[in-house]
Amino acid sequence: MAVRIYKFEKNAESDILPRGVSVSAAAGEALAAAINGQPIFCEELTEPGNARPIVAVVFADPLSVQHFDSLIEATLELSGIQACEVRDLEPHSLLGLGRSAKAGSANDAGTPRRVTQAA
């Protein structure tokens, strides 16, 4: 199992995102297209309508990660949004959720990385 946390935002260099469509809704559609029936689950962690939604994506196996990775950039580009931050979490880091703060800090879970758009 693999887990990633994505933070999305409107792509300032694109005018594809239709007026009145939230980044949150566009992210949901882009994620659904990239999942495409694979054993992948996602959950928005922020309130619907958030301008910079955060979404957890859980992958059942390495093949589902590869499948998702091969499609996500294209689906985001077509949606007019981008992933501005991605954090890979180690499965063992999820075991401490709900425990005391002594169990580990947010930095133990994974290091965020900036995502750049391909030219």
Image (tube, rainbow, N blue to C red):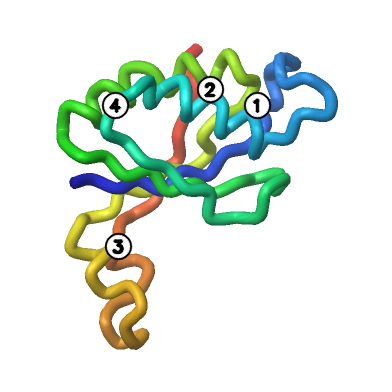
* Badge 2 or badge 3: first in the primary sequence: 2
User: Label 2 belongs to which residue?
Assistant: 76
Position of 74 relative to 61 (above/below): above
User: Label 4 belongs to which residue?
Assistant: 38
Q: CA distance from mark 1 to mark 2?
A: 9 Å
What crowding class fits label 4: few (fewer than 14 Cα within 10 Å), some (14-19), or many (20 or more)? Answer: some
User: Label 1 belongs to which residue?
Assistant: 11
Position of 5 relative to 94 (above/below): above
Position of 54 relative to 33 (above/below): below
From the top left corner, tell me how far across and down residue 117 is, in percent: 50, 22
Kind of residue at disc 3:
Ala
* Badge 1 or badge 2: first in the primary sequence: 1
Q: CA distance from mark 2 to mark 3?
A: 25 Å
Q: CA distance from mark 4 to mark 1?
A: 26 Å
Q: CA distance from mark 2 to mark 4?
A: 18 Å
Give SS at disc 2: helix
Q: CA distance from mark 1 to mark 3?
A: 27 Å
Q: CA distance from mark 3 to mark 4?
A: 25 Å
User: Label 3 belongs to which residue?
Assistant: 109
* Badge 4 or badge 1: first in the primary sequence: 1
